[in-house]
Every structure is written in C-alpha cells, then in structure tokens.
Image: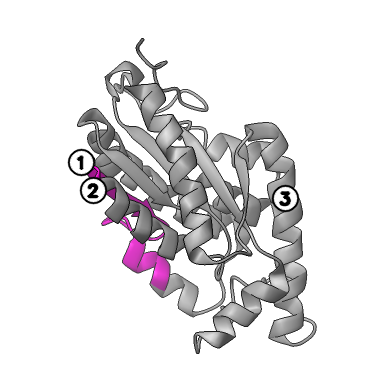
C-alpha cells in the first residue's frame, strides 16, 4: 500500500508536485540545550547504517542568506518583522534547493528545527499569528515532528555545564529587557513552551520527554521513526 502523498500547509511552491516527493521529512524541535543536534547526529548515523540516504537542514543554513542573517543578528537590533522575513527567506531557499530535491530522491530529510520554532518566536514577539502562518504556508507538512520538552531551568543548566553562554535572542532579551539574562531566559522559554503547547494541539506533533539520558531519548525517537519508515514501505 502506497503512503499518502505529501501536502503543503498552503499553496506551496509553484511547479512542485507533492506526489513526486517519495522521501520522509522528520523534524526535531526544541530549544537550545534540549539535545536536538545530538539526536539529529545519532539519528543520521542510525539511518545511514540502516541503508537510508539522509539530508540535513536547519535554521540559518541556506546558501542565500544564512551569513547575512547571522551578521544582522550580531547587532541585536533586528525588529520582529524583519527577523521573521529573514528566517522565512532562509527556510524558503532550503525548501526549494535542499528539502524538495532530497525528498524527490527518496532521502530521509532530518530538520534540526522547522517552521514551528520560527512561528513560536514570531508570535511571542506579538506578531499577528495569522500573518505568521501565511508567511510559512509554503512549507511541506512533515511526516513526523518530535518536540523535545525540557524544563527551562534544565536548559540553562545544560548550556552552562557545556561551558556555553546564554544567547541574546534565545533569551528573548530583545523583547524583555528588564532583569538579568538568566531570569529573562527562563521567562522567555516558558513563553515558547506555552506557544508550542498550543501548536501541538493544532499540528498534532509528538512531545518527547527530553529530560532523560540521551541514549534513552534517542532509542525512543528511533522506535517512533522506525514505525513511520515501515508504514512508507
């Protein structure tokens, strides 16, 4: 039995027939410190050992605007609308030039965050939710979305434990300027968690307890993805 064809959230990209996209789009969502990149790497290795070709995408990885976006963020002056359109351009370039071609070639595309993070960030910055959804309506509906849920205080502890620093934007310092960065980080991450819970009800993605050992979490992800791959055979 053939799996159902891919669909776009809206009209999608012109000239793209979703029926030709035979691969799988697997999304791992979560904040900094949630373990996303670790799990993407483990899943890639596991999939390739199992004989699947993979492609990876993520935020700020387009050849078109990724460097310009990173440069613009350094000044800590990007407004919410400009930031949203910058990220949407970065996403659209990857969708057209990486995600679509890989899916046509039956690759498994692993997305280290997708439109959900960008939408949540925009909405908590008080942009109109309907406008935000329209901006990202070109996106393909993934075959699976896994949101790694980790308490904000644990996120901060993990970042500090690795010798890292809290990020200005990931802490929401551009919209909550009062207080130290740690306090603002916790408040901002709680706002994102609340938005993700709303989106989970709308989009039906899986919430994964990310506050466990990496090995246990990854085994959980592998089991769920294995079921998706079997359904597609």
Q: CA distance from mark 2 to mark 3?
A: 34 Å
**What crowding class fits label 3: few (fewer than 14 Cα within 10 Å), some (14-19), or many (20 or more)?**
some
Residue sitting nearer the eye, 60 or 86: 60
* x, y percent for residue 158: 58, 78
* x, y percent for residue 38: 42, 65
Q: Secondary structure at mark 1?
A: loop
The residue stretch that appears in magenta: 48-70
Earlier residue among tags 2 and 3: 2
- Taking the spot 45% from the left edge, 32% from the top edge, the residue there is 227
Residue 147 lies, with reference to residue 203, above or below; the image says below
* x, y percent for residue 97: 25, 42
Residue 118 lies, with reference to residue 214, above or below; the image says above
Q: Secondary structure at mark 2?
A: helix
Q: CA distance from mark 1 to mark 2?
A: 5 Å
Q: Are marks 1 and 2 in contact (CB under 8 Å)?
A: yes
**What crowding class fits label 1: few (fewer than 14 Cα within 10 Å), some (14-19), or many (20 or more)?**
few
Q: Secondary structure at mark 3?
A: helix
Q: Are marks 1 and 3 in contact (CB under 8 Å)?
A: no
* x, y percent for residue 8: 46, 26
Q: Which residue is mark 3?
A: 195
Task: Tell me, yes or no, whether the highlighted magenta stretch contains residue 65.
Answer: yes
- Taking the spot 63% from the left edge, 64% from the top edge, the residue there is 211
Q: Quadrant of the C terminus?
A: top left
Residue 51's label in the rendered image is: 1
Residue sitting nearer the eye, 143 or 195: 143
Q: Quadrant of residue 68?
A: bottom left
Question: Is any part of residue 168 visible from this angle?
Answer: yes
Residue 48's label in the rendered image is: 2
Does residue 99 appear left or right of residue 117 in this picture?
left
- Label 2 vs label 3, nearer the camera: 2
């Amino acid at each position: 039995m053939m799996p159902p064809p891919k669909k776009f959230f809206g009209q999608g990209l012109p000239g793209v027939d979703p029926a030709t996209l035979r691969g799988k789009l697997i999304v791992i969502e979560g904040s900094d410190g949630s373990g996303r990149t670790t799990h993407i790497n483990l899943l890639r290795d596991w999939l390739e050992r199992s004989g699947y070709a993979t492609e990876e995408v993520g935020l700020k990885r387009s050849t078109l605007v990724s460097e310009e976006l990173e440069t613009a963020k350094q000044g800590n002056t990007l407004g919410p609308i400009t930031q949203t359109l910058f990220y949407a351009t970065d996403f659209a370039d990857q969708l057209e030039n990486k995600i679509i071609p890989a899916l046509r070639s039956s690759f498994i595309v692993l997305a280290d965050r997708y439109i959900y993070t960008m939408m949540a960030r925009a909405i908590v910055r008080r942009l109109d939710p309907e406008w935000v959804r329209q901006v990202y309506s070109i996106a393909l509906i993934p075959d699976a979305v896994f949101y790694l849920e980790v308490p904000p205080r644990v996120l901060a502890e993990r970042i500090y434990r690795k010798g890292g620093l809290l990020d200005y934007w990931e802490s929401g310092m551009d919209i909550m300027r009062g207080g130290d960065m740690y306090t603002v980080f916790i408040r901002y991450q709680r706002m994102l968690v609340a938005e993700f819970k709303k989106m989970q009800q709308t989009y039906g993605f899986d919430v994964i307890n990310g506050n466990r050992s990496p090995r246990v979490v990854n085994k959980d992800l592998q089991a769920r993805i294995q079921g998706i791959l079997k359904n597609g055979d």
